[in-house]
Image (spheres, rainbow, N blue to C red):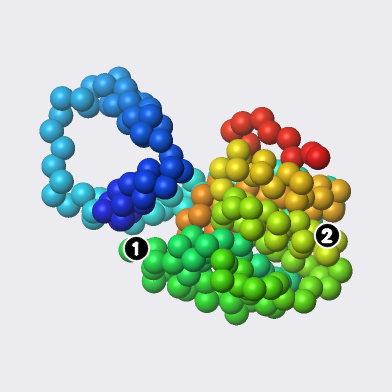
Amino acid sequence: VDVERSIGSVLQALDEGRISEECINAHCSKVLAYKFALRLDNQPISAEGILQDLNSKECYQLISSLAEKSVTLVSDRRKKAGRIDARKSTLIALGDDENLRYRSLGDTLVTAREFYRYIDENYGKVVSYNSRTEQLPQLGKREQVVVEVFSAKQRYIDTLAAITKRCSNVVVVFYVNPYEMLTFKNSLRLDRNTVICAYEDTYHAQRAAQEALQGRIAFEGKMPVKISLER
């Protein structure tokens, strides 16, 4: 966890109107309420060594375990999840530069590079489709395509619609919150698309989703809210 970067990201989201001050206050109040309930409200907190504590080996193991337990199989009518052959698949990442797979990941960067090297070496083709990409690669109708969604911008909603219309064998992995998934409702074809939710665009979430997609771990997550992706 990079504290300074996290604070900067929150402030940027506030400036851009993606979150409100009321939302921040509500989350802070929730944390403070739990601290009060646990009688931690009067205990002084030292900032000494806080980065080491937040980025400890135990912390990463816990985050990794939580990510694996969270990956949710939302829809799989064609029973494709857990049976993807990455070597015969094209992986397409939809998102802006700051939230695609190659962004800086703080203290996990070395581990992340190893994982992403694995992705690049094992998938038949890897495409980062961002705001500067002009067109999608040629895709066959029956080609196995795995689409990673990192952003709910209209450009990517339209791009996913084009992919699912062109290809009949598409797995969509969302790294956004469930409510943002609803914006893609008309881009999905649930009769032939497998839909997975990993909830956040972190290295641990991406690794866990790939492990589940290729059958190395089970899908154990449950949607925390009731949503319908049916058109």
Asked which quadrant contains residue 185, the reply is top right
Please tell me which residue lies in front, 54 or 226: 226
Q: Type of residue at label 2?
A: Lys
Side of 127 where 2 appears, left or right: left
Label 1: state its secondary structure. Answer: helix
In the depicted structure, whether residue 3 falls above or below residue 180: below
User: What's the distance in space between the residues labelled 2 and 1, CA to CA?
Assistant: 37 Å
Q: How crowded is mark 2: few (under 14 residues within 10 Å), some or many (20 or more)?
A: some
What residue does disc 2 label?
A: 165
Task: Look at label 1 and name its amino acid.
Answer: Gly
Residue 81 image point, x, y percent: 74, 55
Q: Which residue is drawn at 57% across and 67% down?
A: 130
Q: Image quarter for residue 131?
A: bottom right
Q: Residues within 10 Å of mark 1 (few under 14, many from 20)?
A: few
Residue identified by numbered label 1:
106
Q: Which of marks 2 and 1 is in front?
A: 2
Q: Is residue 186 visible to the viewer in this orientation of the structure?
A: yes
Q: Is mark 2 on a helix, strand or loop?
A: helix
Look at 72% across and 50% down and name the residue there.
195
The quadrant of the rendering that contains the N terminus is: bottom left
Q: Is residue 220 visible?
A: no
Q: Kindly identify the residue that appears in the image at 39 percent across and 54 percent down.
A: 60
Q: Which of marks 2 and 1 is nearer the N terminus?
A: 1
Q: In which quarter of the image is the C terminus?
A: top right
The answer to whether 27 appears left or right of 49 in the picture is: right
Q: Which of 20 and 113 is in front in this view?
A: 20
Residue placed at 41% from the left, 35% from the top?
20
**Which percent across, then down, holds residue 4?**
26, 53
User: In x, y percent, where is residue 83?
Assistant: 76, 61
